[in-house]
Image (cartoon, grey):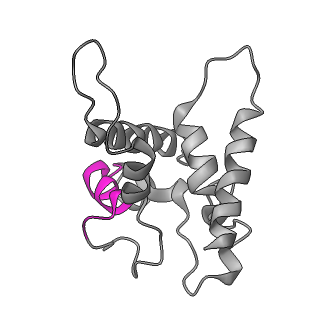
Amino acid sequence: MIALTLAMSLGSSISQSADAGSPPDYGKGIYDSKCAACHGVDGKGNGPFAASLVKKPSDLTVIAKSNKGVIPVMALEALIDGREEAFLHGSREMPVWGQELRVEAGASWPEYMGVPFNPEVFVRARIMALLDYIGRIQEK
C-alpha cells in the first residue's frame, strides 16, 4: 500500500509538470496519478510496479482493437469504479479507484451557489475524464 501511495504521488507530480501554457488534461493527470504505476506511462502494461503483480496489467492501448473498434465505456467505468466485479481485468488486483475518488471528494463538500455538492458526480466526472484519455491512447 505504501508503494501504491508513492506511485500515485509521483504520478501527480508528472502530470503537474506539463506545459504551463496549455490547458490541463484532466484525464491524463488522473491516469498519471492512478494508473501509470502499473499500466505504464504509455499504457502498455509495463509500469514500474507491473513486475511485482501476480497478473500483468492490461495493455490499455488495445482496448478498442480487442473490441471490434469499440471502447466498452460502461464496462470500463464499472471496473474502475470498483462496485462491480472486474470481469475484464480478472482478479481484483486493481485498486478500487471509485472508493478512493469518493474519499477525495469528501463527504461534506460545501454548497456551490446554493446547490449541494454530490460526490457521485465528482467521481463519475473523473472516471469519464480518465476514459477519455484512455480513448485517446488507443492504437490505430
What secondary structure do most residues of the magenta stretch adopt?
A: helix
- The magenta stretch spans residue 66: no
Q: Does residue 41 appear to the left or right of 85 in the view shown?
A: right
Q: Does residue 79 appear to the left or right of 54 in the view shown?
A: left
Above or below for 104 versus 94: above
- The magenta stretch spans residue 81: yes
Q: Which residues are magenta?
A: 70-84
Above or below for 53 versus 116: below
Please tell me in which quadrant of the rendered image residue 65 appears: bottom left
x and y percent of residue 47 in the render? 69, 65
x and y percent of residue 34 in the render? 57, 54
x and y percent of residue 106 in the render? 38, 44
The residue drawn where x is 62% and y is 18% is 23
Outermost residue on the bottom side: it is: 54
The residue drawn where x is 69% and y is 71% is 3
The residue drawn where x is 51% and y is 40% is 133
Q: Quadrant of the N terminus?
A: bottom right
Q: Does residue 4 appear to the left or right of 120 in the view shown?
A: right
User: Of 85 and 56, which appears nearest the observer?
Assistant: 85
Above or below for 61 versus 19: below
